[in-house]
Image (cartoon, coloured by chain):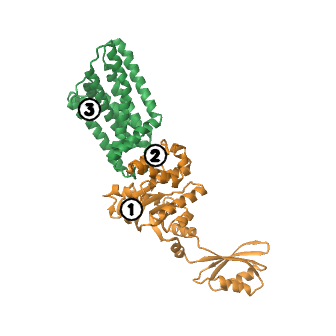
Amino acid sequence: MIHVENLTKYYSDLCAVDCIDFDIHKGEVLGLLGPNGAGKTTVLQMLTGFLRPTSGSIRVKDLTIEENSLQIKKLLGYLPEDAPLYHDMLVYDYLDYVADIRELRGSKKLSRIRYLADICGLHEVMHKPIGELSKGFKQRVGLAHAMMNDPEILILDEPTSGLDPNQIVEIRGIIKQIGKEKTVILSTHILNEAEATCGRVLIINRGKIVADGTTETLRQAGSGDYIINISIENAILQSVEKELTSIDGVIETTHVDNDEDVLNLKLTCRSSRDLRGEIYRKIKETDWALLELYQETQSLENIFRELTTEN
Amino acid sequence: MRQVIHILKKEFNGYFISPIAYIVISIFLLITGWFFFTAFFIYNQADLRNFFVLLPIIFSFVAPAVTMRLFSEELNTGSYEILLTMPVTFRDVVLGKFLAAVAFIAAMLVPTFAYPITTSLLGQLDWGPVVGGYVGAVLLGASFVSVGLLASSLTRNQIIAFIIGMAICFSLTLIDKMLFFLPQSWLGFFEYLGADFHFQNISKGIIDSRDLIYFLSVTFVGLYCTHMVMEGRN
């Protein structure tokens, strides 16, 4: 669907995007992740044709951005960061204007505006000036704007920034709904969001792609260490540490805290096997009382931190 | 071309949503009305010379006030990004905004029809210069609007856009009044650059191709430069 090759962007001397290559397939929901200033917005702006790349090429279907930017713009829906809209206009007037530009006419235009007002929940604010709306509503108007032409590719720049938790859930729901049929590209620096909505994640740092894959494959690509938490009653710290480190695969035990008689420990494990059974059997041999034993999944946050701070 | 009309419609309506239109129109009518009618009864002549003589100076600050927000506001709020990622070309945007401002200037002139009408009731009015004057006013307005549009595309600050636009328009208006500073051989050239010189010709009722070409070329240069600024921006 979209093919990006050697994409580079310099702002005078500053390199914002450095030789990026990637492909996006039809029906994918792609999350662009990265710390602030990593180049996410620049990549999106180049995809929409708003910024001209310093070098490299972008192809959408069989169209290139240099020659067919108008046709590409017709395929795209774009929501910029913070939804910068015309503050003086009424919501309805604005959507009507966007529909005109998107070449929708007559009854088709009305039914499209009504449909978007339904799924974005805009009916109650239809006749208010955009400048008077709360941030969440502005974002929804922006989303309605982006979806006006029923685009094949929807590009959203931080669609949930600044929204309250309820609104975030709503917007994510809408994105998921759209993502069933359309290609969606969204940027975010909230990792849960990428996990909750995106089938595939692209992590960018300092203008370069540092990871590409589903959230599952990214987890596995991490260092391979995982953590098991246990809580034990009726035991002495030293002997517990001695017993547990004797298990093959347990690298380190960290004592978290003591509440009354309970010992809470974190075991760092490096093993392709599941060590929980072995740990349980080891404890069963003693007279300690096992209160809790669970494996922590390697969080995406850790992977993100590893990937974006090491260089 | 359809996109030009959609943008025109949106920008033109935009003037009347914000208070800017009402303020600019009232100031324009107040100033022209005051200067026209105070002198009108002194001269005791049934013509509109006093109105048209002042028009270039008044337009020099009215036109930039009309155009200052067209690009600056979009650049400032970031809606420029939304505008350009819709299926429109730079040409559509420039023409749409330009025509909206010209339409606004024309709408602003409509209430001044009261002057020739009242004058014609008071005495024998020669309609030739009046028609010429209005044609000239629209042409003058169009060229100043294109200059103001260029100024607006240069900055995200509306006040700076207004001042740049006003400075250029005033220079064009006053350049042929400054001719005594210049060597003889330059006179013709600088006189030709003066907007006021060409406007006064038209407002005498003589529509000369040289004057038409002047206004159309100023307009074209203004719009073309605006287009270049937009292209250069990203």
* Residue that mark 2 sits on: A94
Which chain is disc 3 placed on? B
In front: label 2 or label 3: 2
Q: Percent position (x, y) of residue B57?
A: 35, 27
On whether disc 1 and disc 3 are found on a single subunit, the reply is: no
Distance, label 2 to label 3, CA atoms, is: 41 Å
On whether disc 2 and disc 1 are found on a single subunit, the reply is: yes
The answer to whether B177 appears left or right of A174 in the picture is: left
For image coordinates 58% across by 56% down, the residue present is: A167
* Residue that mark 1 sits on: A8
Q: Earlier in the sequence, mark 2 or mark 1?
A: 1
Q: Quadrant of residue B6?
A: top left
Q: Tag 1: Cα neighbours inside 10 Å, few (<14), some, or many (≥20)?
A: many
Which chain is disc 2 placed on? A
Residue A125 in sight = yes
Going by the numbered disc 3, the residue's amino acid type is Leu
* Residue that mark 3 sits on: B193
Kind of element beneath mark 1: strand
Going by the numbered disc 1, the residue's amino acid type is Thr
Going by the numbered disc 2, the residue's amino acid type is Tyr
The answer to whether A45 appears left or right of A159 in the picture is: left
Q: Percent position (x, y) of residue A211?
A: 48, 70
The answer to whether A273 appears left or right of A256 in the picture is: left
